[in-house]
Image (cartoon, rainbow, N blue to C red):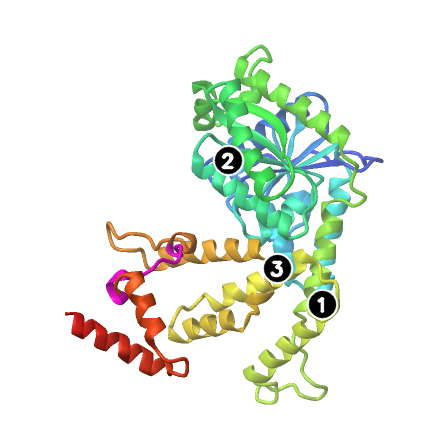
Amino acid sequence: MPVKTAREPVKHNPNQPRTIAITGGKGGVGKTSVALNLALTLARQDRRVLLLDGDTDLANVSIMVGLYPRKTLANVMAGECRLEDIILETDYGLHIVPGASGVQECMDMGPAESLRVLRALYNLENRYDYVITDTAAGLQAAGLHMIAATELACMVVTPDPASLTDAFSLIKVLRRRGYNRIPSILVNMAQGASQARSVFQRLDAAAQRHLGFSLHYMGGIWRDETLRQSVLNQKPVALLPVSDPSCRQFHTLADMVNVRLSQLPEKKAGIAAYWHKVSRRGAEVTPAPVAAPGKTTEEEAPDAKTQCLGAVSQLESVFARAPVDPMLRYEAFTRLFALLGSTLDSDVIEIVQTGLGSFQWENLDPEHKRHLATHLRELADQISPPPQGAKKPEAASSILREPFYDRISFGEQDRLVRVLKEQPADISLDQLLRSLSDNDQGRS
């Protein structure tokens, strides 16, 4: 099918658009299908909707409606075209930006280039009522930033236990990185309302127990053959008559989203403004190396050691200023660890071991110590799984037993008491033990 670009830009929206992130802890949960059908449903209700395909650079959203873009956001960032040139238009006037995950690269661009792209994105998003982002799955920095950039995070899970585990890990990481909004949970591929509610309750109970807050229930999408075939046929169920059960449940989801948005305060800044702030912070943390005045040849530039130590010193100075934004700290050290882990050899192992030994673990509270110890044990099992059938080490509480009297070593208690009474008061410990040993030999 030929590329179908947007015919004309929509008019400026005087109000801030409502921003929604459709996300998930792992792939394969139907996240892209949910994002596309929700966007089409809102567009069908005469809303101006922009769908950002931030899952991968492969433009999966547009493929699901039979569109194959020739250019993505990467081309815009390379200066090969304008942002308006890559926008695709599909049914009900829904606009799609393919390859929106490339916005993460703004952090690595120069200030002028990143400002050009983000200003274009800012002007674009303010023309819509809704901006929906299909985020990258997992715990990568790009996906976390996409969630943080929106006012509502709708996390898609399935009844699969692995989906719940990964979703909980994502929620936990977001929380520890300073994300304070409550995620909404949408249960996809459920057999019915009771199963969807049960799946949510399991995840919500874990959040209450370990994180200290409750999640928001967005509802469920039932598993049916129509929905599965719609993906294969590149015809989303949101295009079916509203009377169709598969289509109707996305109208219900749209209503639930609007109710939830009405309960949340509107963000003062949009997606482009958020990424602009992140890119500026990234430039402060990892500035591009600048050669000294008059030094233009490669030989005169600082060597790798000087540049590396200089970058570390700059990072130390940034983190010496308190308080440090948790998302910034996460971004910086995640990228450093990714760089460290690109080549796993004996030197890297030595660096990791030394780094772990340099932490002041005694300053951790008992709960964090237990959590970290459990995580390190799981990591050790992944690196070197225990042999088949090997018993796991007993917990410390099971190893510690009540003190008891050893009759094998000291004989009956009354004999030991009698021997102790017979010894002089000034006897040394060595003499006492020798005396007990002599008595044992005489008794034998």
Could you say where residue 267 lies in the image, as x and y percent from the top left?
78, 41
* Residue 284's disc number: 1
Q: Residue furthest left?
A: 444
Magenta region, residue range = 399-410
- Residue 250 lies in what quarter of the image? top right
Callout 1 amino acid: Glu
Callout 2 amino acid: Ile
* x 66%, y 56%: residue: 327
| Observer-nearest of 327 and 385 | 385
* x 41%, y 54%: residue: 378
Q: Residues within 10 Å of mark 2 (few under 14, many from 20)?
A: some
Image marks 1 and 2: residues in contact by CB distance under 8 Å? no
For marks 1 and 3, give the CA distance: 13 Å
Q: Which residue is mark 2?
A: 63
In what quadrant of the picture does the C terminus appear?
A: bottom left
* Residue 331's disc number: 3
Mark closer to the chain start, 1 or 2? 2
Specify whether residue 236 is in view: no
Per the image, label 1 sits on a secondary structure element best described as helix
Q: Answer with left or right where residue 361 lies relative to residue 123.
A: left
* x 64%, y 35%: residue: 214
Is residue 1 positioned above or below 428 on the image? above
